[in-house]
Image (cartoon, rainbow, N blue to C red):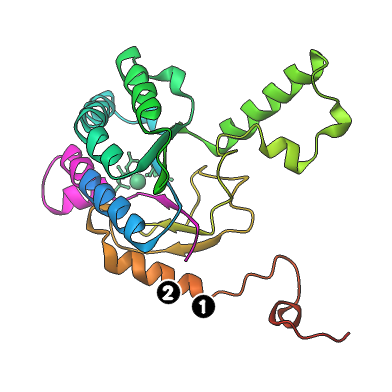
Amino acid sequence: MPAHIAIVMDGNGRWAKKRKRPRNMGHQAGLKALRATIEHCVHLGVETLTVFAFSSENWSRPASEISRLMEIFLRALDKEANELHANGICLRFIGDKTAFKPAIEKKMSEVEALTINNNRLVANIAVNYGGRWDITQAATQIAKAAAEGRLSPDDVDEFQFAKFLALAESPDPDLFIRTGGEMRISNFLLWQSAYTEFYFTPTLWPDFDKQVLDQAITAFHSRERRYGRTSDQVKGFTGA
Ligand code: IPE
Ligand code: IPE
Ligand code: MG
C-alpha cells in the first residue's frame, strides 16, 4: 500500500457546470468526496493523505467564489473536526496560513491541536499552498538560521533542507493523483514529488470514489520504482 498519497482535487467547477449549478455546489460536493476518501484511506491502511484544497494561485479567482470557498471551509472545520478526531485522524494544514481571516486561522490551529496525537491517518490539507512558496519559505528560514549562527551554510544538504519544508513530518508521497483530467502539477508538492508515481484520471473530483482510488492504487502497484537504478538491479539480479 502506498504509505503517502497526495491528491490534486480538481474538477469541482466543471462538475457543477455539467449540472447547470453554481460552482460552489461543486465545491460542496467535493467536500463529500474528501470525507469519503479519508474514510477509505483509513480503511486501506494508508498512513498519510495530502490534499490540495486551495492553491496560492487560487486567490486570482472571482472574489465571490473565494468567499464561498472560505465559508465552506470554515463550516467544514466546525462540522467535521469532532468526527475526524473520534476516528483517529490527525489533521494538519500546510501553506501560508497568515493570508486567511483570523477566524479561519484560529479554527485551523484549534483543529490541529485537538487532533495532534491521533495516529490512524495523518491528513494534510494544503491551503494557500504553493510548491514554490514552500521551497522559498524553507530557504528564508535557513538563511535566517545561518545569519544568526544557528546553522552553518556548509551543513545545508537535501536532508537538512527538507526539514524546513511544510511536510517535514511526512515521508515523500508515493502516489500523486490528479482528478479532472489536467496533466500538470499546478505548483503542488514540487520538492516532495521528485520520485512520486503520478496517476491522472478524467474523473471530476466530486465523482471520485473508492473504485477510482483502487484503480490508482492498482496502477501504482504495476510501476517499477527504480530511483535511477536499472531494472535488473531493482529485481535483485546481480551482474555487470
Ligand atoms: C478544484 O476544482 C477546487 C479548487 C481549486 C478550489 P476547480 O474549482 O478548479 O474545478 P474546475 O477545474 O474549474 O472544474
Ligand atoms: C489546482 O487546481 C489547485 C487545487 C485543486 C486546489 P486548479 O484548478 O487551480 O489548477 P489549474 O489552474 O487548472 O492549473
Ligand atoms: Mg481546476
Dot 2, how many residues are within 10 Å of its Cα: few (below 14), some (14-19), or many (20+)? few
Residue ranking furthest to the left? 20
Instruction: Pick the quarter of the image with the C terminus.
Output: bottom right
Contact, CB < 8 Å: mark 1 with mark 2?
Answer: yes
**What residue sits right under mark 2 in the picture?**
218
The amino acid type, in three-letter code, at marker 1 is Ser
Specify whether residue 21 is painted magenta: yes
* Residue 79 position (above or below residue 174): above
Q: Determine whether the residue tagged by mark 1 lies in a helix, strand or loop.
A: loop
- Residue at 75% x, 21% y is 143
**Which residues fall within the magenta stretch?**
1-29
Q: Position of residue 82 (x, y in %)?
A: 24, 34
| Mark 1 sits near ligand 2, with its Cβ under 8 Å away | no
Residue 140 visible? The answer is yes
Q: Nearer the viewer, residue 29 or 79?
A: 79
Determine crowd level at label 1: few under 14, some 14-19, many 20+ residues with C-alpha closer than 10 A. Answer: few
Residue 83 lies in quadrant: top left
Give coordinates of residue 233: x percent, y percent: 76, 78
Q: For ligand 1, which image quadrant applies?
A: top left
Q: Is residue 211 magenta?
A: no
Q: Position of residue 188 (x, y in %)?
A: 50, 44
Q: Which residue is mark 1?
A: 222
Horizontally, residue 231 falls left or right of residue 36, namely right
